[in-house]
Image (cartoon, rainbow, N blue to C red):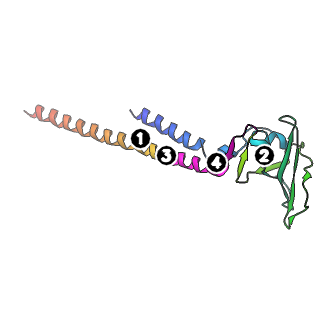
Amino acid sequence: MSSKKDAAKKVAVVAAKRFTLDKVVAYQHKGIRNLPELLSLYPNYGLGFKVFYKNDKDKSYYYIDKVNPINNRHADFYGLHYTNNGVAGNRIEKIKNTLKKGIWNFSITPGIFVTDNGVEYDIKKTEELIEKKKLFLESRLKALGEPTKGKLIREEEKRKKAEAAAAGKKKK
């Protein structure tokens, strides 16, 4: 009986961990990738994302405004360049060195993205849905734990009564 309970807990806990925002957003492919390979899994190749060099001391970054995808490993990215002082230029410029591997990182800016087939994808709403699901799974885990505890207590009481009855019969 306890093995079923443990199995149910493992399934619920794994499901709760699987759907956190970090797991949804994190790119989990092993290896060193260039910028098009990193962003090819997201809607519109990361249109609206903030991209930056991993080891940039100036903390400058780009907001992707236009993407020309060639395939999953090659794409042209255009965006506004920002520095610590604000916008570096008033025009959208081509982002250089996008094909160099291992130098890029990105963060998702909350907003609505429209995919090529017209589906709207809202990251804030997705975060909220993930949190709701996580809370639901935690409450379900608690609900699974409560009845089994009650059942175990009832079984323990029945066993004690049976032992007491057996001991009473032996005395007579």
Cα separation, mark 4 vs mark 3, equals: 16 Å
Q: Position of residue 91 (x, y in %)?
A: 91, 57
**Label 4 vs 3, first from the N-terminus:** 4
Cα separation, mark 2 vs mark 3, equals: 30 Å
Residue type (three-letter) at the residue carrying disc 3? Phe
Left or right of 124, for residue 32: right
Crowd class of label 4 (few under 14; some 14 to 19; many from 20; radius 10 Å) = some
Q: Which residue is mark 2?
A: 46
Residue type (three-letter) at the residue carrying disc 4? Leu
Do tag 2 and tag 4 residues touch (Cβ < 8 Å)?
no
| Position of 167 relative to 79 (above/below) | above
Q: Position of residue 143 (x, y in %)?
A: 41, 44
**Label 4 vs 1, first from the N-terminus:** 4
Q: Which residue is mark 4?
A: 21
* Label 4 element class: helix
| Position of 60 relative to 78 (above/below) | below
Residue type (three-letter) at the residue carrying disc 2? Gly
Q: Which residue is mark 1?
A: 144
Q: Which residue is mark 3?
A: 136
